[in-house]
Amino acid sequence: MQTFLRFARAIAAAALLCAVAAPAEAQVLGPAPEGCTDEVLPSGARIRLCIPRRGWNGDLLVWAHGYVSPLQPLDFYSFSFPEGFNPQEAALSRGFAFATTSYRRNGLAILPGVEDVRQLVAAFRARAAPAHTYLFGVSEGGLVTTLSLERYPELYSGGLAMCGPIGSFREQLNYFGDFRALFDTFFPGVLPGSAIQIPPEVIAGWFTVYLPKVQAAIAANPSAARQLVRTAKAAFDPDDPETIATTIVSVLQFNIFATNDAVEQLGGNPYDNRGRLYFGSHDDLLLNLRVERFAASARALRSVAEHETTGDVSLPLVTLHTTLDPIVPYWHEPLYLLKVDTSDRGVVVPLPVHRYGHCALTNEEILGSLKLLLALGR
């Protein structure tokens, strides 16, 4: 009974999380404040350019937002940080100029995001010449930040990448695919579709029909839920078993809302688990015999390769990441460091935050990381 109550509380918390996140934990920045103008790039991306009318310190902070569902409108997005950190307010209240873009599309928009941010900086420089330009972003925007520093170092003075899939984009996609394939093995028949194809009715009915089914399945079989997160290598807080249900719902939600768009944008299925062995269940042999196998398309893998970081960074890059991140796993950080040539003149400073949650960062942690970046980038 105690285990059931813990999972029931977790399911309620996960439902609240989903109602807020839906599904990307994005928050709209709101109307342009004084000193800001909103425009549209030739690509269709919206941009916001802000210069303090009084007391500008001469530097520019550029914000790269995280993943936003293709079902949402183009807008200027922040992120639902626990303490409500607002990048626009943080920049302008401290004397920085601020710029951001909606990107030209929602959904998988990493490469378009890199280009739109480049054009955003050019549009700002047509109005004023900042002494330094710092790029900072969260989640998908963390990868946009890192790729931007690698590919256009002449535009920036440094960057802060928060909880981004910077170590391996392909392994991030495999992580999402593995989680769904394993969920279908431990909880067969709960969700229609598969790891690589989501029926439209599941997307439309996620909150009203299928999320309740997932919650009920977790509550009815907590042992299978624990085996799922172990075999998928998904993060949860070992001191708080309720986070198991939160992890399951959160990762599945990305599978539901992001999979079809990713397949379309990449030109095919990028997920491949044909040679993967899964460990951590009560019967690994049976699990590996039962789990559905998928083959990635060559075209999709070529597209995925274009999204990969190289580690060739010649500017200061600060990374900030929660160590128990269920959406973008912390293992991206060491994977990225393995790519970096330490003899290069760039400085990569990883800052781990020992906490559960996807970018569950405090205002103090974010502002402290920005302060470090500014010190390194001058």
Image: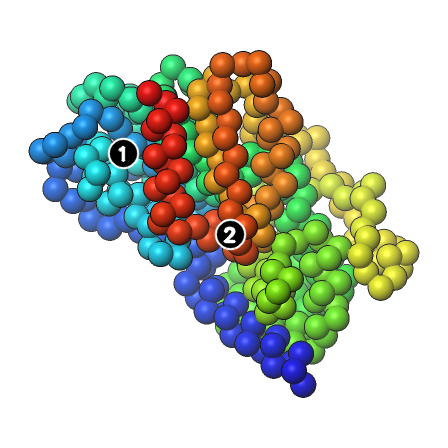
Q: Which mark is residue 99?
A: 1
Residue ID for mark 2: 358
Question: Of residues 338 and 196, which is closer to you in this image?
Answer: 338
Residue depicted at 66% across the width and 31% down the height? 301
Question: Of residues 269 and 167, which is closer to you in this image?
Answer: 167
Q: Can residue 34 be seen?
A: yes
Question: Of residues 16 and 132, which is closer to you in this image?
Answer: 132
The x and y percentages for residue 166 are 55, 34
Lateral position of residue 50 relative to residue 309, left or right: left
Up/down of 378 relative to 36, above or below: above
Residue depicted at 17% across the width and 22% down the height? 127
Amino acid type, callout 2: His
| Sequence-wise first label, 1 or 2 | 1
Q: Give the foreground label among 1 and 2.
A: 2
The x and y percentages for residue 77 are 34, 46
Q: Quadrant of residue 290?
A: bottom right
Image quadrant where one finds the N terminus: bottom right
Up/down of 208 relative to 78, above or below: below
Dot 1: within a 10 Å radius of its alpha carbon, few (fewer than 14), some, or many (20 or more) residues?
many
Image quadrant where one finds the C terminus: top left
Q: Quadrant of residue 218?
A: bottom right
Lateral position of residue 338 relative to residue 378, left or right: right
Amino acid type, callout 1: Ala
What colour-coding does the image apply? Answer: rainbow
Residue depicted at 26% across the width and 43% down the height? 90
Q: For the residue labelled by badge 1, is the local secondary structure a helix, a strand or a loop?
A: strand
Q: For the residue labelled by badge 2, is the local secondary structure a helix, a strand or a loop?
A: loop
